[in-house]
Image (cartoon, rainbow, N blue to C red):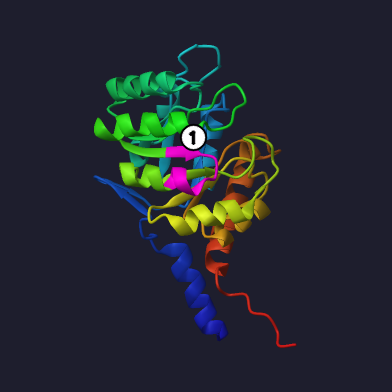
Amino acid sequence: MSMGSLAAFHTATEGDVPEPWLVVGEHSFRSRLILGIEQYTSPELVGAVLEAGGCDVFITTFDLTNARPSLLLSDLDEVVELDRFTWIGTTSFARTKDEALRTVRALRDAFGIQVMKLDVRPADNLPHNAQTVTAARELVADGFAVLPFIRPDVDTALELQDIGCSAIRVLTSPVASHRGIDDPDAVRAVIEAVDVPVVIEGGLGSPAHVVAAMELGATAVLVNTAVAVAASPARMAAAMRHAVLAGQYGVGQVTRPQA
């Protein structure tokens, strides 16, 4: 590749609007980096992080216990142009299937959200695959677009695909562990088994972990704690954004020299 064509490639990839990796009704998901915002208490920091990450999704939830600090949407709306994002709901605080279903319906009633990031995580904070399948079946039947979170298991992923879930989210290591991908083979098996997009998340603690996730074949990644606890969350969000691109563009480009 000549220097001229390389410059043209750089301009195109940085300037063009990416093709959607997921379309749900009128919503198109283009950014392959999704950032959680549940750990922030500053509207200004949320805005800086979403901007630096190049994000097009805004995730919101209800804490049914009212035990966690949270931002007021009215305060956020003064700093962040919320209308330019695709809003999705999350049940990330739900410990049981019933709590997840209550959260989803509260989000629909309050904000009209129909795209749901479904988490059922008991006290161990790991996805409960069986309860997730049961909840997903009920929500899809009720007209929701569902993005369920599971431990890497091919049978569970295929069942969720057959139910009609829009994408599958796969745990790579415990949430907030910063361990990276514990079992790449198990994650890759899910990616190769299903036809719907696969989002990798959980334990992605560095840009290197994000590159590895994309190299496995992930459609997108979701990162939360690694950005929220960074010395500069906005700078880390930018690093994660470029890590997604590096992993995506690098797939299939590595060649081994002849022995």
Q: Is residue 50 visible?
A: yes
Residue 81: x %, y % from top left: 39, 36
Residue at 39% across, 21% down: 103
Q: Quadrant of the C terminus?
A: bottom right
**Label total for image:** 1
Say what amino acid the circle numbered 1 marks. Answer: Asn
Residue 118 seen from this side: no
Q: Start and end of the magenta stretch?
A: 148-157
| Picture layout, residue 148 above or below residue 52 | above
Indicate whether 21 appears above or below 136.
below
Relative placement, left or right, of 258 versus 84 is right
Residue toward you, 149 or 117: 149
Residue at x-position 53% and y-position 33%: 127
Where is mark 1, residue-wise? 129
Residue closest to the eye, 103 or 148: 148
Please tell me in which quadrant of the rendered image residue 72 appears. Answer: top left
Quarter that holds the N terminus: bottom right
Q: Residue at x 55, y 58 (%)?
A: 214
Q: Is residue 161 above or below residue 129?
A: below
